[in-house]
Image: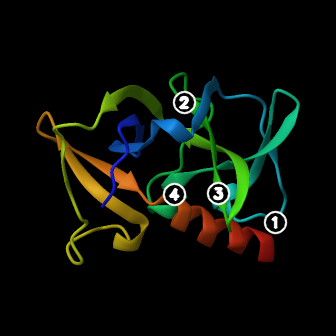
């Protein structure tokens, strides 16, 4: 498993998550969200990011957590640049709270166990242990490919 050098940590449903800091373009207070009628809950909104229309994804839906409240004062949109179906894409991810960027050197990361998880193990790249706490490393490529493909067919 190849780990990023640094990750951005954030909270969803009270759980700690982390994504590669290199894919993060910016972190925003939640702008006005335009809801898309009939779109699946994972990506049912669009936001304006510096004049660009950006789909807004809620990873809490993929992990069957309570949906992120966009009106909470700590909620942020993490704007990432990534590949979706081998095409470059800019996507906003709702986060209950953005914590900090941490270096991954010296951090123990293990594969998600195949049983005993409340989430789909194929949506998890690994589980890091840092300062006695677990941090989930989601497989963004897999989650986005699956859920955005569903959105395109909805």
Question: In the rendered structure, are the residues bearing label 1 and label 3 in contact, judged by CB atoms less than 8 Å apart?
Answer: no
Disc 2, SS: loop
Q: Is residue 52 above or below residue 44?
A: above
Q: Where is residue 93 drawn, in percent x and y? A: 60, 44
Tell me the mark number nearer the camera, choosing from 4 and 2: 4
- Give the labeled residue for mark 3: 83
Q: Which mark is residue 75?
A: 2
- Work out whether residue 95 can be spotted: no
Tell me the mark number nearer the camera, choosing from 1 and 3: 3
Disc 3, SS: strand
Q: Which mark is residue 121?
A: none
Q: Residue furthest right?
A: 51
> What separation in Å lies between label 1 and label 2 (alpha carbons)?
24 Å
In terms of depth relative to the viewer, which is nearer, 145 or 39? 145
Q: Residues within 10 Å of mark 1 (few under 14, many from 20)?
A: few
Tell me which label, 3 or 2, sits earlier in the chain. 2
Tell me which label, 1 or 3, sits earlier in the chain. 1
> What separation in Å lies between label 1 and label 3 (alpha carbons)?
25 Å
Tell me which label, 4 or 2, sits earlier in the chain. 2
Q: Where is residue 46 drawn, in percent x and y? A: 79, 45
Disc 1, SS: loop
> What separation in Å lies between label 1 and label 4 (alpha carbons)?
23 Å
Left or right, 153 with reference to 11: right
- The residue at 40%/46% (across/down) is 13
- Work out whether residue 137 can be spotted: yes
Q: Splitting the image into 4 quarters, where does residue 102 fall?
A: top left
Q: Splitting the image into 4 quarters, where does residue 101 fall?
A: top left
Q: Which mark is residue 38?
A: 1
Tell me the mark number nearer the camera, choosing from 1 and 4: 4
């Amino acid at each position: 498993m190849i780990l990023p050098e640094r990750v951005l940590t954030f909270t969803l449903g009270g759980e700690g998550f982390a994504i590669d800091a290199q894919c993060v373009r910016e972190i925003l207070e939640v702008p006005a969200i335009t809801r898309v009628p009939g779109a699946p809950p994972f990506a049912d909104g669009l936001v304006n990011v510096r004049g660009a229309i950006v789909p807004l994804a809620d990873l809490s839906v993929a992990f069957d957590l309570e949906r992120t409240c966009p009106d909470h004062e700590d909620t942020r949109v993490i704007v990432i640049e990534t590949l979706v179906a081998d095409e470059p894409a800019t996507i906003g991810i709702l986060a209950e709270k953005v914590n900090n960027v941490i270096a991954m050197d010296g951090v123990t990361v293990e594969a998600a166990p195949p049983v005993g998880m409340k989430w789909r193990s194929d949506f998890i790249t690994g589980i890091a242990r840092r300062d006695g706490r677990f941090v989930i490393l989601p497989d963004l490529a897999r989650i986005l490919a699956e859920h955005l493909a569903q959105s395109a067919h909805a």
